[in-house]
Amino acid sequence: DAGVIQSPRHEVTEMGQEVTLRCKPISGHDYLFWYRQTMMRGLELLIYFNNNVPIDDSGMPEDRFSAKMPNASFSTLKIQPSEPRDSAVYFCASSFSPGRRNSPLHFGNGTRLTVT
Amino acid sequence: ELKVEQNPLFLSMQEGKNYTIYCNYSTTSDRLYWYRQDPGKSLESLFVLLSNGAVKQEGRLMASLDTKARLSTLHITAAVHDLSATYFCAVEAAGNKLTFGGGTRVLVKP
């Protein structure tokens, strides 16, 4: 298994531009999570999906952030317009459902976003 | 709101000595996870603790869970340089959400 795949690995953009981060979860996992990691705030859960349906987006910081999961093998996190304070590492993670939760969340390699 | 606190935030270790990282959390949960993160890398799962009294060991690392005290510990035995990393605990609350602690940065010196 290739694990959780995120793209791009690095993204540098100018303030005001649209940014789209992509994630392919592990096949068979029915939960997908987007986390953001910064030095100041640590790891924050932004949104998570179950069977492609958004369950909790209370961590999404503002309306500038949106996430979709059009099918079981693909999710996007979009920031429009981007701001310098959005600079962070964004991780996607996937897992099985709670009944099989002896398996942990599996994290992708992250996307390092820099907004100038 | 679930709060997860780790201490210490930073731990300078001498090789060969034993150390413990603590993870306290604020609400009832019986699922706790430990992760390791190397600089610039992703998070790697170390342990999944699913019940009160659970203890798991892998190499020089041992994790335990006391759900009544809302406390988990990660014990490092005879530290070696390869264990230098940041260690996170994460607690699963209702709705399958994981809340992470702030992390403990470990530096093992010769």
Image (cartoon, coloured by chain):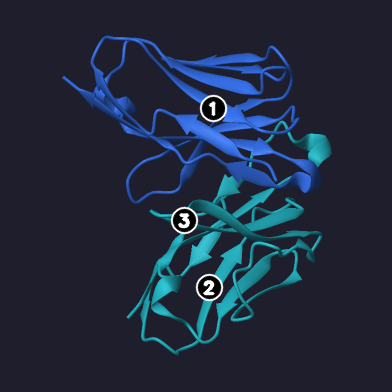
Chain colours: A cyan, B blue
Residue A37 screen position, x and y as percent: 46, 56
Residue B69 screen position, x and y as percent: 67, 18
Residue A75 drawn above or below residue B20: below
Q: Is residue A43 left or right of residue B91?
A: left
Q: Which residue bears the numbered disc 1?
A: B23
Q: Are marks 2 and 1 on the same chain?
A: no
Q: Which residue bears the numbered disc 3?
A: A37
Viewer-proximal residue among A39 and A17: A39
Q: Which residue bears the numbered disc 2?
A: A21
Of marks 3 and 2, the one in the foreground? 3
Provide the secondary structure element on which disc 1 rests: strand
Of marks 3 and 1, the one in the foreground? 1
Residue A66 drawn above or below residue B62: below
Circles 2 and 1, Cβ within 8 Å, touching? The answer is: no
Residue B56 screen position, x and y as percent: 59, 16
Q: Residues within 10 Å of mark 1 (few under 14, many from 20)?
A: many
Residue A112 visible? The answer is no
Q: Are marks 3 and 2 on the same chain?
A: yes
Residue A86 drawn above or below residue A41: below
Residue type indicated by callout 1: Cys
Q: Is residue A22 left or right of residue A27?
A: left
Can you say which quadrant of the picture contains the C terminus of chain B? top left
Name the residue at the left extreme. B110
* Residue at x-position 74% and y-position 30%: B29
Provide the secondary structure element on which disc 3 rests: strand
